[in-house]
Image (cartoon, helix red, strand yellow):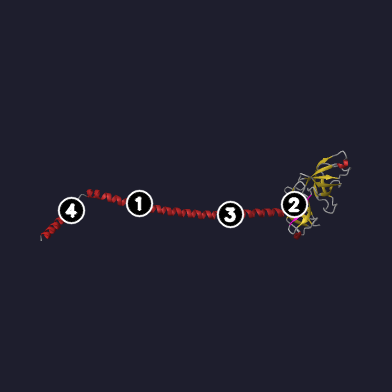
Amino acid sequence: MYSDNKNSKLGIVITIVILVFLVIITNLDNNIWSRIASPFTKITMSVQSGITYLKNKISKNDDYFATVDDLKSKNEELKKENEELKQKKQELEILKAENKTLKEHVKLVDKYSDYDCIPGYVIQRDFSNYSKTIVINIGRKDGIEIGMTVVADGGLVGYIVSAEENTSKVQTIIDTASAVSALFANTEKSLVTRGILDSDNRIKGTYIDNDVVVNEGDDIETSGIGGIYPKNIKIGKVKEIVNTQNKTNRYVYIETSVDFGSLNNVLVLKN
C-alpha cells in the first residue's frame, strides 16, 4: 500500500517536471533556440555539401573518361586515315615511276624503230674491277636469246650472255672482257673498244690505222662487223688521245654515251 502511494507520487512529480520543461521550451527566445540548433544545422549542411561535392566530382570524372574514350576513338580514326594516305601516296609514286618508264620505253622504241625491240629494265648490277654485268627483268618467255644486242637511250649497252625464263644477264661494253668492233663516225675508219679497270664510264679504243686523224670529241659507233652488234649504234666520244713512239700502238679513251651508273631502261634488239 505504501509502495503504491510512493510510485503514484513519483509519477506526478515526473509529469509536473515534463510540463514545466515544455512550458520553458515554448517560451524560449528564438535566438536562444537558434544557438542551440546551430551546431546540428552546421553538421547537417556539411554532410549535405560533402555529398553534393562528391556527386559533382563523380559526374566530372564520368565526363573526363567519356572525353578520353572519344579522343582515343578519334586518334584511331586519324591513324587509319594516315595509313590510307601513305598507301595512296606509295601507289601514286609507283604509278608515276611506271609512267616514266613507259614514256622512256616509247622514246626508245621510236629511236630504234628499225628494229624489233623488247623493252626491259635493270634489276641488278654487278660492277667490279674485272666484271661489269647487269641483269634485266626479261628472259626466254619474252623472246630473249643469247647474243642479242642491248641498247639504251644513250646508245650501246652490251649483249645478252645468258637467258633464264624471266631474267637475262648482259655483258656491258665497259666489261674488261668485252670487245666491240667500232669506227670513227666521221671517217668510218675502224678501231676496237674494250673495257678498262676502275672505270664505269670510259673504255679504251685500240687498233687505230696510222692514217686516221683523231680528234677529241669524235663520235664512235658500232661498225656492224663481228656478227653481234648492228651498225651505227652510238658508243661514245673520244675523250683523250694517247700517242706513243710507235704510231701503230696509239690509243684513245672514249667516254661512253650510256651512263651505266644510272642505267634503268633498256631495249633488246631481236634482229
Q: Position of residue 260 (x, y in %)?
A: 75, 48
The disc, 1 or 3, on the residue closer to the chain's N-terminal end is 1
Circle number at residue 50: 1
Q: Residue 205, image x and y in percent?
A: 83, 45
Q: Residue furthest front?
A: 2
Mark 2 lies on residue: 134
Left or right of 169 on screen, residue 76: left
Residue labelled with disc 4? 21
Q: Quadrant of residue 145?
A: bottom right
Name the residue at 18% across, 53% down: 21
Q: CA distance from mark 4 to mark 3?
A: 85 Å
| Residue 203: image location, x then y, percent | 80, 45
- Which residue in the rendered view is the most extreme toward the left? 1
Q: Which residues are magenta?
A: 167-172
Is residue 251 visible in the rendered image? The answer is yes
Q: Earlier in the sequence, mark 3 or mark 2?
A: 3
As drawn, 210 above or below 57: above
Q: Earlier in the sequence, mark 4 or mark 2?
A: 4
